[in-house]
Amino acid sequence: MDAFPIPADTYKLGFIGAGKMAESIARGVVRSGILPASRITTATHSNPLRREAFESFGVRVLSKNDDVVEESDVIVFSVKPQVVKDAVSKLKPLLSKKKLLVSVAAGIKLKDLEEWAGSSRFIRVMPNTPAAVGEAASVMSLGGTATEEDGNLIAKLFGSVGKIWRADEKFFDAVTGLSGSGPAYIYLAIEALADGGVAAGLPRELALGLASQTVLGAASMATKTGKHPGQLKDDVTSPGGTTIAGIHELEKGGFRGLLMNAVVAAAKRGRELS
């Protein structure tokens, strides 16, 4: 593998699949200055709006996936899990050991990806949908012959659309249950908080704005202060006050247990699907 390092200053990036996740990653890479759009490609999509989306910020859209692979040093498979095998297998003759392969398909294990590709220079990444606004929570795991340099390169790429951690692949079902599905839990909480505001007498628009910003602010406090969330909760909760009254109701309803159960259920379903 040492004979085939990816040229960090000149490498080209290709996407197999031109969906929203691929667009989010490509936009983040360009916006952060990691790569110019001229060094990024994808292939034509059945929906012309997807072509327009990529071309709008300078990414070249080629006629077929074969061309993308031939032009690229790093290839990201960003297609639906049910079509990953077909997409990788069709391109196998072109996937030399000189190319670094990446998959963002949920539930597809490295051993299968490596078998289909005929190459173990693969990195699996699990991002989530906030990549669209540069706030993804991503986790990556390296395949058999992916090097530390390969891992650093991919960490930098995905770091352009949020934060990325490295973990053993055995944790990926749990990652799916927490950060993969987690945004939906938070959207549900935002909607419920806004409904509570409306029930308490607030106009709908104001309630939704306050709920969304409150969740954003609380998450920022948790990530930036370094304090345990329990401590942050205690900091807001004065004796006999309004906050402890609300928390009491959440505890009576099993709020924490419900969230824990949601993560475990989603992780279990992830295992079943994979």
Image: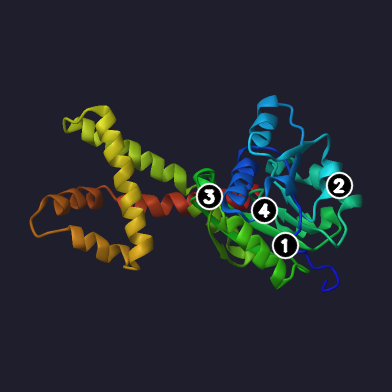
Residue at 19% x, 58% y: name it.
Answer: 236
Residue 163, given in percent of the width and then of the height, sits at 52, 59
State which mark lies toward you, 1 or 2: 1
Q: Secondary structure at mark 4?
A: loop
Q: How far apart are labels 3 and 1 at the CA level?
A: 31 Å
Q: How far apart are labels 4 and 1 at the CA level?
A: 9 Å
Residue 221, given in percent of the width and then of the height, sits at 32, 59
Q: Earlier in the sequence, mark 4 or mark 1?
A: 1
Residue 213, given in percent of the width and then of the height, sits at 31, 44
Q: Describe residue 166's horizontal placement relative to residue 188 as left or right.
A: right
Residue at 85% x, 62% y: name it.
Answer: 98
- The relative height of residue 50 versus residue 247 in the rendered view (above or below) is above
Residue at 33% x, 41% y: name it.
Answer: 212
Residue on which the image places disc 1? 9
Residue at 54% x, 48% y: name it.
Answer: 128
Residue on which the image places disc 2? 91
Q: Secondary structure at mark 2?
A: helix
Residue on which the image places disc 4? 35
Report the amino acid beneath label 2. Answer: Leu
Residue on which the image places disc 3? 180
The crowd level at tag 4 (other Cα within 10 Å; few <14, some 14-19, many 20+) is many
The crowd level at tag 1 (other Cα within 10 Å; few <14, some 14-19, many 20+) is few
Q: Earlier in the sequence, mark 3 or mark 1?
A: 1
Q: Earlier in the sequence, mark 1 or mark 2?
A: 1
